Structure formats: C-alpha cells, structure tokens
Image (spheres, grey):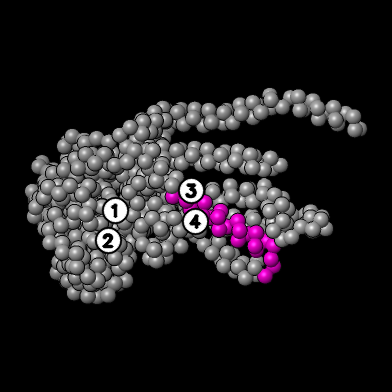
Amino acid sequence: MAIPMSADRTQRRSWRPPTISRSMLLSTLTVAVLLAAWAIVTEMGWANELFLPKPQAVWAAFVKTMTKGYQGATLLQHLGASLYRILVAFALACLIGIPLGVVMGVSKNARALLNPLIEFYRPLPPLGLYTLLVMWLGIGESSKLSLLFLAGLPGVVISTIQAVTSVDPVYVRAAQSLGANRRHLLFHVYLPAAGPLILAGMRISLGFTYTVLVAAEIVAASAGIGWMIWDAAKFLLSDVVIMGLIVLGLTGVVLDLMMRSIAKLLMPWSRT
Amino acid sequence: MMKKLATLALAAFAFTAPARAEDKPAKVTVGYLNLVNAQLVTKHLGLLAKEMPGVDIKYVKVGGGGDMLRAIAGNDVDFGGLGNPPTAIGATRALPIKGILVINLLDYVESLVVRTDKNISSLKDLKGKTVAAPFGSTTHYLLLQALKDEGVDPASMKIIDLAPSDIAAAWLRGDIDAAWFWEPNLDKAVKNGGKILITSGEMTKRGYPTWDIGVVMNAFAEKYPSYVEKFIKAECEGIDFWLKNPEKTAEIIAEELSLPLPDATRMMKGTGMVPCNKQLTEEYLGTTAKKGKFVDTLVSTADFLAKQERLPKLLPRADFEAFIQPAYLEKVVGR
C-alpha cells in the first residue's frame, strides 16, 4: 500500500507545473466566458444599455478617467485617495487588533473584560455606525478612517484570539521546560505558531474594510473610488460605475496577493 | 414581478374579452417625492381612487430624484415626479417617460443658508469656505449657476456632497460654513446661527427656475390614455384644494410628513403651486402647438450637466420639447 502511494505522490509532484497552469487556464476561462457573455448580451441588445453598457463603453470610461479624470480628479488620484484610507485604517486595525487578540488569547481575564465590546459592535451594520461617527467626528477624514478601522478590527482580533488559543500546548510546555520566560514564549512560540491563522484573519479583515469603502466615501468626499461610483450612479453613468467596481475589485486582488507574498517571506512555514 | 404578472393577466384578459375601446389597468402605482406639494393632498383625500374606481392604487414614497430615476428605469412606477436636473438626466438618457403636469415650483423651501458669524454677505465671501449641497439636486445646480453668474470660481471654495440630513448634522457641529438645501432640515440650520443668503425663488427671478414635474411611463400612457387624464384630474383637484384651503392643507401635510403644524405651514408658503389651467401658459408647460419655458429650463439644465460631464451629451431642443406633453392636461382643462 505504501509504495503505490508514494509513487503516486512523486508522480503528482512531477506533474505540478502543468496543474498550476491548468488552474490558471481555468481561471482565465471563467473571466473569458464572463466577458464574452457580457459582450454578446450587450451586442444583441438584450440588456438596457442604461444598466449594462457595452464593454467598449466601460473601457472608454476607464481611458477617459485615466487621462481626463472624473469630476476634478484622475482615476489614479481617486484610487490613491481610497487606498490611502484603506491602508491607514487597515494598518491601524492590525497594529491594535493583533496585540489585543494576543492578550485576549493568552489571558482569560482579558478576554472576559474585552469580549462584550467586540462582540457587541461586530454585527452592527456599518452604515448605522457611520451616522453616529459623522455626528461625533465630523465629515472629514477621521470619521471615514474610523469607519474603515472599525470594519477591519474584529476580523483581526477574533482570528488572533483563535490562533493563539489553538497553539499546541505541547510547544508551550516544551519551551517552558527549556526555561523560556513569557517574552520568549510570545515571540518564539505563540506568534510564529499563530502567524498563519492571524494572516488569514488579516486577509478577511482587509476584505471587510473594502466592503465599507463606498459607504465611507458617500459622506462629504470629493475624491475616492467609492465616491466616484456613488456620484456616477446618481447621474445614471453606469459605465463609470462598472469601471469603478472593476478597478476596486482588481486592486483588492492585488492587495491580497501582496499580503500573501509578504507572508511567505516572513513565515516560510505558512501554507497560505 | 407582480406588475409583470398583472400585465400578463391583463393581456390574457384582453384576448378573451370582447374588444373594447380601452382597457382598465388593474393597478396604478404612483411614486411621489418626499416634498411638500399638493400630491400629498390628493393622496390624503383619496382623490385618485375617486377618479379610478375599481383600480388598485398604490402610493410609493421616493426619497429623491436619483431614486425616482432608478424606479422609472426599473419600471416600478406608472406615475412619478422629478425635479428639473433629474428630468434633464432622464430625458437625455432616453428614459421612457413624458412630462404631463407641474407638481410644484420651488421658492424659499430651498435656500442657501450661511453662518452669521462668518461675515458672508455675498457669494464672493464664500471663497475659502466649505459649502455643502446634495450633488445632482436642484440646489447643487442653482449653487453652481449662481456662482457662475457672479463670476466666482467654484474651485475657490470647498464644495462637498452631503445628503440634507447630513448637512444638518454637519452644520450643528460647525463643519460647514454654508449650504444650499431644503426643508425640513433647512430650518435647523437657520435656527442654529444661520441666515438665508439666496432662496431658490430668487433664482427663478434671475432666470433659473426650479420645479418638479409629474411624469407618466410611456407604455402606460399608450395603453391607458384616459387614465392619464384621470390622474391629472385628481392632481388638479388636489392643487385647487391647496389653493383654496391653506389651513386644512397645512394640517394634511403635517400629518403626512409627521411635521409640527407651524413647520408645515411655513414650508407650504415657500412652495409654489400652479393652478392647472395656468400650467398651459408660456411660463410653464405651454401648449402642444407651442411648448412653454419648461423646455428652456430643461435645455439649460442639460447643457449645464453636460458641461459638468455628468451627461454624455446635450440633446437637441426637439428632444426636450417631445418630453413635455401638455396634450393630456389640455383635455382635462378643456382646451
């Protein structure tokens, strides 16, 4: 039994490059089918162009926004404004969320103290929170950043708690028996072992931050991809709306890929 | 979906029933704006139901012009109401609607309010200040037109996009120095350190009228032309009631919009209502033979939006003339 299995395994390993390109092929196929369906539906006039413009129209909107801009800012400026908000808020969520999660994961008392807060606000709809944030912090950048931060925080905290509590106690006892103190435990046992799970939480949390971007930019923004989408929707400019959504989606994918490659560099043992 | 089923059922009925001059709609959906106008009176007194016995009448409150455009594009209403900027957008984007009735003119229910402690006595003093308006609305349009007329560069101030309720909150916090928006939130700004610099009514005198127009879906109008007349007749009765019974009207509005009576009275006075027989004059819709000034307003609004790149192009005047259809109203008032 063991021999065929290992043979199978070596065989699979030698076939690895083709399987990767095959999955890439399949992914490309999905995109191609979607684009083709979009082109056919619009070319045949099956869809109202007001709702679903032709791919060419969306491309034209992209080129125009890149070169001439939309309402006083080019696409890159809109993107820059949004990415700045997302990255600052996300960085804050990680800087505060990970230590908080570690503390809550290691100490039962800390968990009992802080859990009510996190569990209470986590399921609140972001727009409901936002009206309050605007009243408290005003219509400037701080209310937008806070909303994005609050959207990102629970994902990081909860996954960090889970990551830390699921560290195999054998590792901890082994390190303690070798004379490790609390600091050693934290930096050499807990964090490395919990790293991959924390990273998974960070990726989910970045996604949450993304989902509230349009909501955050509805109030008193004059630049940002979310604001551009919102503004264009008011004037039935669906080509700009769809273009904005595609740009938002693609930057999300790129950011996620970047996080994964950073993780691979920092934690070669992680399998994400 | 229900609407589709209803049309299907109607179509089936049309096949089996002996041919008649005109079918009766099973259901009529009226989308009305969250505004102070006589449509609330018509609704409250059930005037439409009296005109259309046996028809299921549904009223849907729509938040603003943008939502109304979406409702029209999605075929969710039979009748609707639109301000002139959304109307210009809808006509340019070839939405299947026609303008049939003036539902209200905007006077001082909409105003530019400025902070009294900021020494703003003219539009020029807005330089370097933060000014809010709901983008895409009549007031956003008037703000930019007023600045243009006085030769003030909009880029010299910070103009931000805020919904009326958010403007009120931002005003109370002191985040903004001026805002052009409407009641009932306008009053909160005036009572908290604000004074009115320009009203939308003054802009009408300068040649920039703002109004809301009643629209009907083309498909409905083709199928049930006499029901379009019935709709107009009911709305005209509402307008007459408004003009003849201001006190009773204020009570109705206070109840419909859950407002205190003094607020409702003030907002009523700040809204212009045009009796139906006057709507066919040069000043408003005009006649089928010669369309009135509403066409001019639509053309200049569309031109403005096109220059702002919020419309892809400016349509020829004929398209806006075709949008205004006084024919139904002409039949109702007997011309």
Please give the chain letter of the residue carrying mark 3: A
Left or right, A138 with reference to A197: left
The region drawn magenta spans A85-109
**The C terminus of chain A - image quarter:** top right
Name the residue beneath numbered marker 3.
A87
Q: Quadrant of residue A55?
A: top left
Task: Kindly indicate whether the residues beneath marks 1 and 3 are on one polypeptide chain.
Answer: no
Residue that appears at 54% across and 64% down:
A121
Earlier in the chain: of badge 1 and badge 2, it is 1
Which dot marks residue A237? Answer: none
Residue type highlighted by circle 4: Phe
Q: In what element is the residue under mark 3?
A: helix
Q: Which residue occupies the foreground of this view, B14 or B220?
A: B220
Please give the chain letter of the residue carrying mark 4: A
In reply to whether residue A92 is colored magenta, the answer given is yes
Task: Kindly indicate whether the residues beneath marks 2 and 4 are on one polypeptide chain.
Answer: no
Q: In what element is the residue under mark 1?
A: strand
Q: Are marks 1 and 2 in contact (CB under 8 Å)?
A: yes
**The N terminus of chain A - image quarter:** top right
Name the main secondary structure of what is drawn in magenta.
Answer: helix
